[in-house]
Amino acid sequence: MMGKVNGAVQTCQEGEGSFRRMDTYINFSDPFVSERFDPNSCTWAFGMNLFDLQEWRRQNLTAVYSSYLQMNGRDPLWKAGSLPLGWLIFYNQTVPLDKRWQILGLGYDSGIPRSEIDRAAVIHYDGVMKPWLEIGIGKYKGYWSRRISYHHPYLQQCNIHE
């Protein structure tokens, strides 16, 4: 992966529902952040990533992860979950993958063409309208439900039924 650690689909196309910018979630008023990261740099989607674990170990990214977590505990560097932490750790370490690797938006965008979904290697129900919820987008639920064993004990414990 050309010396990079992560391969992922980018989310930096303005006008798309998946569009994200680092400065929306990361505290660029903090000197540690502003000196090391570009607020306008391209972000990428979680859900489907390719990792070069040898390169990860070579760069000691587990220690970087721990260090950023500790720093965030003292003085908040980011808000809202794990996305920003991943963007910081893999900053300048991500190879962009073709968008067909992961189709985004099945949890918020009802206008995704079926042809795009059918071509995708991975479909991602990012957003609040998950297919197992009442509010899920009906025309996308079949992609999920046909692969689910509703009798599995974990799904039953989560109250997920046909």
Image: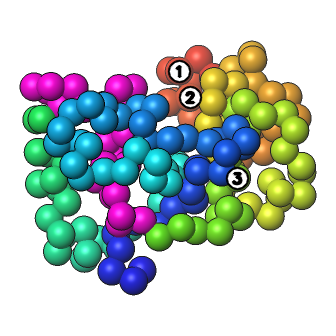
* Left or right of residue 72: residue 144: right
Q: Are marks 2 and 3 in contact (CB under 8 Å)?
A: no
Q: Amino acid at mark 1?
A: Cys
Q: Residue at x 80, y 54 (%)?
A: 117
CB-based contact (under 8 Å), mark 1 and mark 2? yes
- Percent across and percent down for residue 153 are 51, 30
In the rendered image, residue 82 lying in the magenta stretch gets the answer yes
User: Vertically, is 32 above or below 95?
Assistant: above
Instruction: State yes or no: residue 57 in magenta.
Output: no
Magenta region, residue range: 72-94
Secondary structure state at the residue bearing disc 2: helix
- Residue bearing the label numbered 1: 158
Residue at x 66% of width, y 51% of height: 13
Q: Quadrant of residue 136?
A: top right
Nearest to the eye among marks 1 and 3: give it.
Answer: 3
5 w.r.t. 76: above or below = below
Report helix, strand or loop for mark 1: loop
Side of 125 where 66 appears, left or right: left
Q: Amino acid at mark 2?
A: Leu
Which residue in the structure is indicated by mark 3? 103
Inspect this view and state whether residue 48 appears.
no
**Quarter of the image with the C terminus in it:** top right
Task: Give the residue number, with chain letter if any, for mark 2.
Answer: 155
Which residue is at a point 11% across and 54% down the rendered structure image? 63
Q: Earlier in the sequence, mark 1 or mark 3?
A: 3
Element under disc 3? strand
Residue occupying image coordinates x 71% and y 64%:
100
Q: CA distance from mark 1 to mark 3?
A: 26 Å
> Disc 3 marks which amino acid?
Ile
For the image, the number of numbered tags is 3
